Image: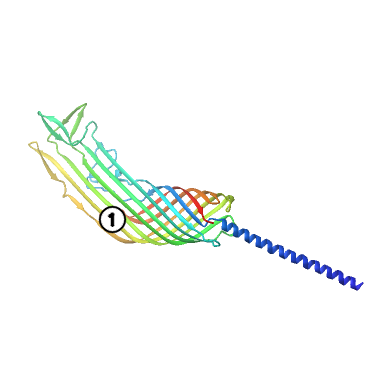
Protein backbone atom coordinates (compact mmCIF):
# COMPACT_ATOMS: atom_id res chain seq x y z
CA UNK A 1 0.00 0.00 0.00
CA UNK A 2 2.81 2.32 0.89
CA UNK A 3 4.56 1.59 -2.43
CA UNK A 4 1.38 2.35 -4.40
CA UNK A 5 1.11 5.72 -2.73
CA UNK A 6 4.74 6.50 -3.50
CA UNK A 7 4.34 5.51 -7.16
CA UNK A 8 1.21 7.67 -7.53
CA UNK A 9 3.03 10.67 -6.06
CA UNK A 10 5.93 10.17 -8.45
CA UNK A 11 3.57 10.01 -11.44
CA UNK A 12 1.80 13.25 -10.36
CA UNK A 13 5.12 15.03 -9.91
CA UNK A 14 6.22 13.86 -13.35
CA UNK A 15 3.01 15.16 -14.95
CA UNK A 16 3.46 18.61 -13.33
CA UNK A 17 7.07 18.72 -14.53
CA UNK A 18 5.96 17.84 -18.07
CA UNK A 19 3.22 20.48 -17.99
CA UNK A 20 5.64 23.13 -16.69
CA UNK A 21 8.19 22.24 -19.35
CA UNK A 22 5.61 22.41 -22.14
CA UNK A 23 4.25 25.73 -20.83
CA UNK A 24 7.71 27.23 -20.60
CA UNK A 25 8.53 26.09 -24.13
CA UNK A 26 5.22 27.51 -25.36
CA UNK A 27 5.90 30.89 -23.70
CA UNK A 28 9.42 30.99 -25.12
CA UNK A 29 8.03 30.10 -28.53
CA UNK A 30 5.38 32.79 -28.30
CA UNK A 31 7.93 35.38 -27.18
CA UNK A 32 10.29 34.39 -29.97
CA UNK A 33 7.42 34.54 -32.45
CA UNK A 34 6.38 38.00 -31.15
CA UNK A 35 9.93 39.27 -31.40
CA UNK A 36 10.22 37.87 -34.90
CA UNK A 37 6.94 39.50 -35.93
CA UNK A 38 8.07 42.80 -34.38
CA UNK A 39 11.35 42.50 -36.22
CA UNK A 40 9.45 41.75 -39.43
CA UNK A 41 7.21 44.81 -38.89
CA UNK A 42 10.28 46.94 -38.21
CA UNK A 43 11.89 45.59 -41.37
CA UNK A 44 8.74 46.46 -43.31
CA UNK A 45 8.70 50.08 -42.11
CA UNK A 46 10.32 52.63 -44.43
CA UNK A 47 13.66 53.87 -43.17
CA UNK A 48 13.69 56.99 -45.34
CA UNK A 49 10.87 59.53 -45.65
CA UNK A 50 10.80 62.29 -48.28
CA UNK A 51 8.37 65.14 -47.59
CA UNK A 52 7.28 67.96 -49.92
CA UNK A 53 4.85 70.73 -49.06
CA UNK A 54 3.51 74.19 -49.76
CA UNK A 55 1.79 76.87 -47.72
CA UNK A 56 0.31 80.34 -47.69
CA UNK A 57 1.97 82.66 -45.17
CA UNK A 58 0.51 85.78 -43.64
CA UNK A 59 3.45 88.16 -43.23
CA UNK A 60 3.52 90.12 -40.00
CA UNK A 61 6.21 92.67 -39.20
CA UNK A 62 7.13 95.59 -41.36
CA UNK A 63 9.32 98.61 -41.81
CA UNK A 64 9.08 102.34 -41.39
CA UNK A 65 7.28 104.14 -44.22
CA UNK A 66 8.82 107.11 -46.01
CA UNK A 67 7.07 110.14 -44.51
CA UNK A 68 8.68 113.38 -45.80
CA UNK A 69 7.67 116.70 -44.17
CA UNK A 70 5.20 117.65 -46.89
CA UNK A 71 3.06 114.61 -45.99
CA UNK A 72 2.97 115.27 -42.26
CA UNK A 73 3.34 119.03 -41.66
CA UNK A 74 0.30 120.35 -43.51
CA UNK A 75 -3.35 119.39 -44.12
CA UNK A 76 -3.80 116.92 -46.92
CA UNK A 77 -5.63 118.06 -50.09
CA UNK A 78 -9.32 117.30 -50.49
CA UNK A 79 -8.83 115.02 -53.51
CA UNK A 80 -6.57 112.62 -51.58
CA UNK A 81 -8.54 109.53 -50.57
CA UNK A 82 -5.52 107.28 -49.84
CA UNK A 83 -2.47 108.55 -48.01
CA UNK A 84 0.87 108.07 -49.82
CA UNK A 85 2.12 106.68 -46.49
CA UNK A 86 -0.53 103.93 -46.47
CA UNK A 87 0.31 103.08 -50.08
CA UNK A 88 3.73 101.86 -48.90
CA UNK A 89 2.40 98.95 -46.83
CA UNK A 90 4.24 95.68 -47.33
CA UNK A 91 2.53 92.69 -48.98
CA UNK A 92 0.41 90.80 -46.47
CA UNK A 93 0.79 87.30 -47.96
CA UNK A 94 3.49 85.17 -49.46
CA UNK A 95 3.92 81.62 -50.80
CA UNK A 96 6.12 79.00 -49.11
CA UNK A 97 7.65 75.77 -50.40
CA UNK A 98 9.31 73.25 -48.10
CA UNK A 99 10.95 69.85 -48.11
CA UNK A 100 12.28 67.40 -45.55
CA UNK A 101 14.27 64.14 -45.50
CA UNK A 102 14.11 61.87 -42.43
CA UNK A 103 16.12 58.70 -41.81
CA UNK A 104 15.43 56.11 -39.08
CA UNK A 105 17.96 53.24 -38.87
CA UNK A 106 16.51 49.72 -38.40
CA UNK A 107 16.00 48.65 -34.83
CA UNK A 108 16.34 52.15 -33.32
CA UNK A 109 14.09 55.00 -32.19
CA UNK A 110 16.49 57.66 -33.51
CA UNK A 111 15.49 60.01 -36.33
CA UNK A 112 17.97 62.06 -38.37
CA UNK A 113 16.42 64.82 -40.48
CA UNK A 114 17.18 67.81 -42.70
CA UNK A 115 14.48 70.31 -43.66
CA UNK A 116 14.29 73.50 -45.70
CA UNK A 117 11.57 76.12 -46.15
CA UNK A 118 11.73 78.90 -48.74
CA UNK A 119 9.18 81.61 -49.34
CA UNK A 120 8.79 84.94 -51.10
CA UNK A 121 6.32 87.75 -51.59
CA UNK A 122 6.09 90.56 -54.14
CA UNK A 123 3.92 93.62 -54.31
CA UNK A 124 3.53 96.73 -56.48
CA UNK A 125 1.20 99.67 -55.98
CA UNK A 126 0.63 102.77 -58.07
CA UNK A 127 -1.88 105.26 -56.71
CA UNK A 128 -2.58 108.43 -58.70
CA UNK A 129 -5.01 110.95 -57.18
CA UNK A 130 -5.89 114.32 -58.65
CA UNK A 131 -8.48 117.02 -59.09
CA UNK A 132 -11.61 115.57 -60.76
CA UNK A 133 -11.92 116.15 -64.47
CA UNK A 134 -8.26 117.01 -65.11
CA UNK A 135 -6.17 114.56 -67.08
CA UNK A 136 -2.39 114.54 -66.71
CA UNK A 137 -1.24 112.18 -69.42
CA UNK A 138 2.40 112.46 -70.43
CA UNK A 139 3.13 115.56 -68.36
CA UNK A 140 1.56 118.78 -67.14
CA UNK A 141 -1.73 120.06 -68.46
CA UNK A 142 -1.60 122.56 -71.36
CA UNK A 143 -4.33 125.12 -71.98
CA UNK A 144 -4.66 128.03 -74.41
CA UNK A 145 -4.01 131.41 -72.82
CA UNK A 146 -4.04 134.54 -75.04
CA UNK A 147 -3.57 132.47 -78.17
CA UNK A 148 -0.60 130.45 -76.88
CA UNK A 149 -0.02 127.21 -74.92
CA UNK A 150 0.86 127.51 -71.24
CA UNK A 151 1.85 124.44 -69.21
CA UNK A 152 -0.09 124.22 -65.96
CA UNK A 153 0.44 121.52 -63.33
CA UNK A 154 -2.69 119.73 -62.17
CA UNK A 155 -3.41 119.20 -58.49
CA UNK A 156 -2.31 115.62 -57.86
CA UNK A 157 -0.51 113.03 -55.75
CA UNK A 158 1.31 110.19 -57.46
CA UNK A 159 2.80 107.34 -55.39
CA UNK A 160 4.61 104.25 -56.64
CA UNK A 161 5.81 101.55 -54.25
CA UNK A 162 7.30 98.11 -54.91
CA UNK A 163 8.42 95.48 -52.40
CA UNK A 164 10.20 92.13 -52.75
CA UNK A 165 10.76 89.82 -49.79
CA UNK A 166 12.28 86.35 -49.44
CA UNK A 167 13.02 84.07 -46.49
CA UNK A 168 14.73 80.71 -46.03
CA UNK A 169 14.91 78.45 -42.96
CA UNK A 170 17.08 75.29 -42.74
CA UNK A 171 16.98 72.71 -39.93
CA UNK A 172 19.38 69.85 -39.18
CA UNK A 173 18.02 67.74 -36.35
CA UNK A 174 18.63 64.52 -34.41
CA UNK A 175 15.59 63.14 -32.57
CA UNK A 176 14.41 60.17 -30.54
CA UNK A 177 10.93 58.72 -30.22
CA UNK A 178 10.22 58.91 -26.49
CA UNK A 179 6.56 57.84 -26.64
CA UNK A 180 3.88 59.09 -24.29
CA UNK A 181 3.49 56.60 -21.46
CA UNK A 182 0.63 54.11 -21.89
CA UNK A 183 -0.16 55.60 -25.31
CA UNK A 184 3.20 54.66 -26.79
CA UNK A 185 1.65 52.20 -29.22
CA UNK A 186 -0.60 54.84 -30.79
CA UNK A 187 1.39 58.03 -30.28
CA UNK A 188 4.68 58.99 -31.84
CA UNK A 189 6.49 61.59 -29.78
CA UNK A 190 9.90 62.73 -31.05
CA UNK A 191 12.20 65.12 -29.19
CA UNK A 192 14.64 66.81 -31.58
CA UNK A 193 17.83 68.75 -30.99
CA UNK A 194 19.90 70.43 -33.65
CA UNK A 195 20.82 73.58 -35.53
CA UNK A 196 18.63 76.14 -37.31
CA UNK A 197 19.75 78.61 -39.97
CA UNK A 198 17.53 81.50 -41.07
CA UNK A 199 17.92 84.20 -43.72
CA UNK A 200 15.60 87.13 -44.51
CA UNK A 201 16.01 89.68 -47.28
CA UNK A 202 13.77 92.48 -48.53
CA UNK A 203 14.04 95.28 -51.07
CA UNK A 204 11.74 98.31 -51.44
CA UNK A 205 11.45 101.29 -53.78
CA UNK A 206 9.19 104.30 -53.18
CA UNK A 207 8.57 107.34 -55.40
CA UNK A 208 6.22 110.17 -54.36
CA UNK A 209 5.32 113.29 -56.37
CA UNK A 210 2.82 115.85 -55.17
CA UNK A 211 1.38 119.10 -56.49
CA UNK A 212 -1.36 119.66 -53.92
CA UNK A 213 -2.51 123.28 -54.14
CA UNK A 214 -2.25 124.79 -57.62
CA UNK A 215 -5.39 126.85 -58.25
CA UNK A 216 -7.32 125.11 -61.02
CA UNK A 217 -11.13 125.15 -61.04
CA UNK A 218 -13.59 123.47 -63.37
CA UNK A 219 -16.87 124.48 -64.96
CA UNK A 220 -18.10 121.58 -67.06
CA UNK A 221 -15.43 120.96 -69.66
CA UNK A 222 -13.75 124.34 -69.26
CA UNK A 223 -10.83 125.14 -66.95
CA UNK A 224 -10.16 128.42 -65.22
CA UNK A 225 -6.70 129.23 -63.94
CA UNK A 226 -5.28 132.41 -62.51
CA UNK A 227 -1.75 132.51 -63.82
CA UNK A 228 -0.34 134.45 -60.90
CA UNK A 229 -1.45 132.09 -58.13
CA UNK A 230 1.46 130.53 -56.21
CA UNK A 231 1.62 126.82 -55.45
CA UNK A 232 3.90 124.08 -54.12
CA UNK A 233 5.46 120.99 -55.66
CA UNK A 234 7.12 118.13 -53.76
CA UNK A 235 9.20 115.07 -54.54
CA UNK A 236 10.52 112.14 -52.47
CA UNK A 237 12.18 108.84 -53.33
CA UNK A 238 13.71 105.96 -51.40
CA UNK A 239 15.51 102.69 -52.08
CA UNK A 240 16.11 100.25 -49.22
CA UNK A 241 17.53 96.77 -48.70
CA UNK A 242 17.28 94.97 -45.37
CA UNK A 243 18.55 91.55 -44.32
CA UNK A 244 19.23 89.16 -41.47
CA UNK A 245 21.29 86.00 -41.48
CA UNK A 246 21.78 83.86 -38.37
CA UNK A 247 22.41 80.36 -37.03
CA UNK A 248 21.98 78.78 -33.64
CA UNK A 249 20.83 75.83 -31.51
CA UNK A 250 17.24 74.65 -31.77
CA UNK A 251 14.90 72.23 -30.05
CA UNK A 252 11.60 70.81 -31.32
CA UNK A 253 8.92 68.38 -30.19
CA UNK A 254 6.85 66.63 -32.87
CA UNK A 255 3.96 64.37 -31.93
CA UNK A 256 1.30 62.38 -33.75
CA UNK A 257 -1.64 60.41 -32.29
CA UNK A 258 -3.47 57.81 -34.38
CA UNK A 259 -7.21 58.08 -33.71
CA UNK A 260 -8.50 55.79 -36.49
CA UNK A 261 -6.67 52.70 -37.72
CA UNK A 262 -3.19 51.97 -36.39
CA UNK A 263 0.33 53.27 -36.78
CA UNK A 264 1.49 50.19 -38.72
CA UNK A 265 -1.18 49.87 -41.41
CA UNK A 266 -2.24 53.51 -41.62
CA UNK A 267 -5.24 55.56 -40.64
CA UNK A 268 -6.21 59.03 -39.49
CA UNK A 269 -4.04 60.93 -37.00
CA UNK A 270 -3.77 64.24 -35.19
CA UNK A 271 -0.39 66.02 -35.43
CA UNK A 272 1.12 68.83 -33.39
CA UNK A 273 4.49 70.27 -32.46
CA UNK A 274 6.43 73.20 -31.05
CA UNK A 275 9.92 74.55 -31.70
CA UNK A 276 12.33 77.13 -30.27
CA UNK A 277 15.75 78.47 -31.28
CA UNK A 278 18.24 81.23 -30.57
CA UNK A 279 19.84 82.60 -33.74
CA UNK A 280 23.16 84.43 -33.62
CA UNK A 281 23.70 86.58 -36.69
CA UNK A 282 23.99 89.93 -38.42
CA UNK A 283 21.28 92.46 -39.18
CA UNK A 284 21.82 94.93 -42.04
CA UNK A 285 20.02 97.93 -43.51
CA UNK A 286 21.18 99.87 -46.58
CA UNK A 287 19.11 102.86 -47.66
CA UNK A 288 19.17 105.88 -49.94
CA UNK A 289 16.49 108.56 -49.83
CA UNK A 290 15.94 112.09 -51.14
CA UNK A 291 13.29 114.75 -50.46
CA UNK A 292 12.73 118.19 -52.00
CA UNK A 293 10.04 120.87 -51.95
CA UNK A 294 9.56 124.01 -54.05
CA UNK A 295 7.40 127.09 -53.69
CA UNK A 296 6.49 128.46 -57.12
CA UNK A 297 5.21 132.01 -57.59
CA UNK A 298 5.15 134.41 -60.53
CA UNK A 299 6.58 137.78 -61.37
CA UNK A 300 5.42 139.26 -64.67
CA UNK A 301 4.02 135.83 -65.57
CA UNK A 302 7.49 134.25 -65.11
CA UNK A 303 7.69 131.38 -62.59
CA UNK A 304 10.16 131.71 -59.71
CA UNK A 305 11.04 128.49 -57.88
CA UNK A 306 12.14 128.86 -54.26
CA UNK A 307 13.23 125.80 -52.21
CA UNK A 308 11.07 125.35 -49.14
CA UNK A 309 14.00 123.66 -47.40
CA UNK A 310 17.40 122.46 -48.54
CA UNK A 311 17.13 119.20 -50.50
CA UNK A 312 17.46 116.35 -48.03
CA UNK A 313 19.48 113.33 -49.07
CA UNK A 314 20.89 110.53 -46.91
CA UNK A 315 22.45 107.11 -47.40
CA UNK A 316 22.27 105.27 -44.05
CA UNK A 317 24.19 101.99 -43.88
CA UNK A 318 23.89 99.96 -40.68
CA UNK A 319 25.20 96.54 -39.63
CA UNK A 320 24.71 95.01 -36.20
CA UNK A 321 25.33 91.67 -34.48
CA UNK A 322 22.13 90.43 -32.84
CA UNK A 323 20.58 87.42 -31.11
CA UNK A 324 17.13 86.62 -32.48
CA UNK A 325 14.77 84.47 -30.37
CA UNK A 326 12.55 82.20 -32.44
CA UNK A 327 9.47 80.19 -31.41
CA UNK A 328 6.90 78.38 -33.47
CA UNK A 329 4.44 75.54 -33.67
CA UNK A 330 1.90 73.69 -35.79
CA UNK A 331 -1.28 71.63 -35.55
CA UNK A 332 -2.88 69.48 -38.22
CA UNK A 333 -4.28 66.16 -39.38
CA UNK A 334 -2.81 63.36 -41.48
CA UNK A 335 -4.13 60.52 -43.61
CA UNK A 336 -1.59 57.74 -43.17
CA UNK A 337 -0.75 54.76 -45.34
CA UNK A 338 2.04 52.21 -44.78
CA UNK A 339 4.37 54.04 -47.18
CA UNK A 340 2.76 57.47 -47.60
CA UNK A 341 1.13 60.31 -45.68
CA UNK A 342 -0.92 63.38 -46.65
CA UNK A 343 -1.09 66.21 -44.11
CA UNK A 344 -2.99 69.49 -43.71
CA UNK A 345 -2.65 72.04 -40.96
CA UNK A 346 -1.78 75.51 -39.70
CA UNK A 347 1.65 76.67 -38.57
CA UNK A 348 3.48 79.73 -37.37
CA UNK A 349 7.08 80.87 -36.93
CA UNK A 350 7.94 84.04 -35.02
CA UNK A 351 11.36 85.74 -35.14
CA UNK A 352 11.65 88.58 -32.63
CA UNK A 353 13.54 91.81 -33.49
CA UNK A 354 14.99 90.12 -36.55
CA UNK A 355 14.96 92.99 -39.07
CA UNK A 356 16.11 96.61 -38.93
CA UNK A 357 13.01 98.37 -40.22
CA UNK A 358 14.15 101.96 -39.57
CA UNK A 359 15.14 104.64 -42.04
CA UNK A 360 17.55 107.14 -40.49
CA UNK A 361 17.92 105.27 -37.18
CA UNK A 362 17.70 101.60 -36.30
CA UNK A 363 14.29 100.21 -35.42
CA UNK A 364 14.15 96.46 -34.73
CA UNK A 365 10.97 94.76 -35.95
CA UNK A 366 9.69 91.19 -35.84
CA UNK A 367 9.43 88.92 -38.85
CA UNK A 368 6.52 86.50 -38.45
CA UNK A 369 5.05 83.90 -40.78
CA UNK A 370 1.82 82.00 -40.15
CA UNK A 371 -0.82 80.30 -42.26
CA UNK A 372 -2.18 77.01 -43.66
CA UNK A 373 -0.04 74.30 -45.24
CA UNK A 374 -0.32 70.97 -47.06
CA UNK A 375 2.28 68.21 -47.31
CA UNK A 376 2.76 64.79 -48.89
CA UNK A 377 5.31 62.27 -47.57
CA UNK A 378 6.64 59.15 -49.31
CA UNK A 379 8.38 56.30 -47.45
CA UNK A 380 11.32 54.51 -49.04
CA UNK A 381 13.37 51.49 -48.01
CA UNK A 382 12.36 48.96 -45.36
Name the quadrant of the C terminus.
bottom right
Name the quadrant of the N terminus.
bottom right
Asked which secondary structure carries label 1, the reply is: strand
Write down the residue under mark 1. Answer: 285
Residue at the extreme top of the image, as rendered? 220
Task: Answer with left or right where residue 141 lies relative to residue 3.
Answer: left
- Residue 184 in view: no
Residue at the extreme bottom of the image, as rendered? 2
* Residue 110 percent across, percent down from the top left: 51, 62
Task: Answer with left or right where residue 129 lies relative to residue 257.
Answer: left
Task: Answer with left or right where residue 308 lies relative to residue 317.
Answer: left
- Residue 163 in view: yes
Q: Label 1 neighbourhood size at 10 Å, few (<14), some (14-19), many (20+)?
A: many
Q: How many dots with numbers?
A: 1
Q: Which residue is drawn at 51% across and 52% down?
A: 271
* Residue 305 percent across, percent down from the top left: 12, 43
Residue at the extreme left of the image, as rendered? 300
* Residue 116 percent across, percent down from the top left: 41, 55
Front residue of 65/108: it is: 108
Q: Residue at x 90, y 70 (%)?
A: 4
Q: Is residue 137 above or below residue 121?
A: above
**Image quadrant in which you'd find residue 213:** top left
Residue at the extreme front of the image, as rendered? 381
Q: Residue at x 28, y 49 (%)?
A: 204
Front residue of 114/339: it is: 339
* Residue 273 percent across, percent down from the top left: 49, 55
Q: Residue at x 32, y 44 (%)?
A: 123
Amino acid sequence: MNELTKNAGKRATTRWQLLATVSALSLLGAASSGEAKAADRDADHPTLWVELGAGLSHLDGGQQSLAPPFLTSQPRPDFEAISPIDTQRLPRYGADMDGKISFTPHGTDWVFSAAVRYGRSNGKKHVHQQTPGVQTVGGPLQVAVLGGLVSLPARFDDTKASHNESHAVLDFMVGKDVGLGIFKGNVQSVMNFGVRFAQFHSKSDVNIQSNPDVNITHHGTSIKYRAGDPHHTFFATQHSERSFRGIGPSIAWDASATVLGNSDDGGFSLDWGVNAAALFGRQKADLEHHTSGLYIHYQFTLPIKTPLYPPRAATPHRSRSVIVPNVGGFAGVSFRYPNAKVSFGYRGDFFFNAVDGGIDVRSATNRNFYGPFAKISIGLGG
